[in-house]
Amino acid sequence: MTMIAIGGAIGAGLFVGSGSVIQTAGPAAILSYAAAGLLVLCVLRALGEMVVARPVAGSLAEYARMAMGPFAGFTVGWLYWYLYVVLVGAEAVAGAAILSQWIDLDQWVLSAGLLIIMTAVNLVSVKSFGEFEFWFASIKVVAIVLFLAVGLAWVFGLWPDADAGFHNLTDHGGFAPNGIAGVFSAIVVVMFAFGGTEIVSMAAAESKEPGREVARATNNVLWRVGIFYVASIFLVVTILPWNDAKVLTSPFVSTLDRIGIPAAGTIMQVVILTAVLSVLNSAIYVSSRMLYVLTRDGDAPASLVKLNKRGVPARAVLLGTVAAWGAVIASYISPDKVFTFLVNSIGVILAFVYVAIMFSQIRLRARLRREDPSALTYRMWGYPYLSWLVVATIGVVFIAMARNPDQRNQLIASTVSLLFVAALYPLRAKLGRKPPVREVEVLHH
């Protein structure tokens, strides 16, 4: 569980996406990472409270269903499934782009190969998913720890020919050259990089002691975010000027080049490929489990719920992969229009899901206090004030995005995805074999 949560927290977004965050916020990107980390920690704590009180498989959608009714469960569930299916396609494309530097094959062939391998891993068993994730996470953690050690040695002048000191934090237009709006605009990119930490709550429902596992993994998020994200980004903006063009392309590779590590590019490409495969692996797992839950509640065709001999919802895994092929094909047929729209259309979905988690926690906590207070053994802090503060902060992030021309398209495309899924609910209510239900089955271990 702990390694799955660590793996979820360190995606390719840290190694690649951090460049655009630094360009948006300048050295104040450190604040963007810290603020988004605290935000995600609060969301996980709220989710953890619900998982411990009412463990259910596919928890995100189910808590929305319990707290706000079947429409919310349907919308959150399908949105989350769509997010991870497009992510599977996007990560397969990203992985192929790295592999193509070493293997002389068309990128679509490499994308297909990655999809087939990771689908096979997920079809074998939950155990094989967990073991792959453990090793992927281990490689990423070792890479970050080594990066921090080398970076600190450079900053404090312990490295040969080091340009020691912290002058890059303020030399090029100040600490926050684009103001507080830049810090807020960058938060959504960071939140997407943190996306995946909530997977632990879904995996916990399939573990022997969900309460203990969720509590431990959630508590670990704080130091992981502090060490892996905030500290590594701090070193990047301390070692390199934030407005250096190389920061945008690949901040970690550029930093290692500046320090003078031989073959830095190749080493980081291997680490980034590991991060991509880890996200691919997790995304297939999550999309299949969410589809399984939607089927169980009558929100998707019943045939998808069938488990194979090893307890894996094989049809749900395969449907997610087939849908991901659509994204891969789009990246070759129409990279600038269709593929860009697909990637944009999932940019803010995670923020929508986080808002739904907070609303679910606010309502479910009130209900549990009335009906079953003994179930509240693991609690969200500062209820209800902190819960509402998280919702308000995400609202401010949306406003900052709407005002930023570079991010407006993401906000619009993701809102279109939300409205499209919501518009399908009347069809489900009318044509579904199973009537919409609010109460869901709680797991007992």
Image (cartoon, helix red, strand yellow):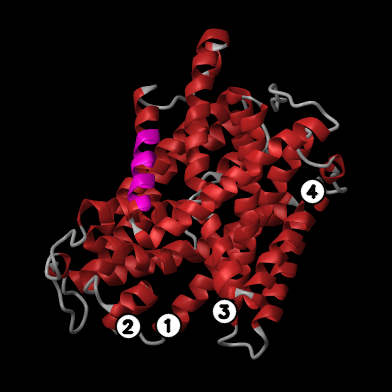
Residue at disc 1, secondary structure: helix
Closest to the observer, 119 or 423: 423
Q: Residue furthest bottom?
A: 104
Residue for badge 3: 97
What amino acid is at disc 1?
Gly
- In the rendered image, residue 258, in percent from the top left (x then y), is placed at 27, 82
What amino acid is at disc 2?
Asp
User: Which sits earlier in the primary sequence, circle 1 or circle 3?
Assistant: 3
Residue 207 appears in the rendering: no
Instruction: Name the residue at 22% across, 78% down.
Output: 159
Q: Residue furthest top?
A: 370
Q: CA distance from mark 1 to mark 3?
A: 14 Å
Q: CA distance from mark 4 to mark 2?
A: 44 Å
Circle number at residue 257: 2
Secondary structure of the magenta portion, mostly? helix
Instruction: Name the residue at 79% across, 48% down.
Output: 312
Closest to the observer, 150 or 48: 48
Is residue 391 shown in magenta? yes
**Which callout, 2 or 3, points to the residue nearer the camera?**
3
Instruction: Name the residue at 58% across, 57% down.
Output: 134
Residue at disc 3, secondary structure: helix
Q: Which residues are magenta?
A: 390-402
**Which callout, 3 or 4, points to the residue nearer the camera?**
3
- In the rendered image, residue 385, in percent from the top left (x then y), is placed at 34, 24
User: Which sits earlier in the primary sequence, circle 3 or circle 4?
Assistant: 3
Residue for badge 1: 265
What amino acid is at disc 4?
Val
Q: Is residue 315 shown left or right of residue 69?
A: right
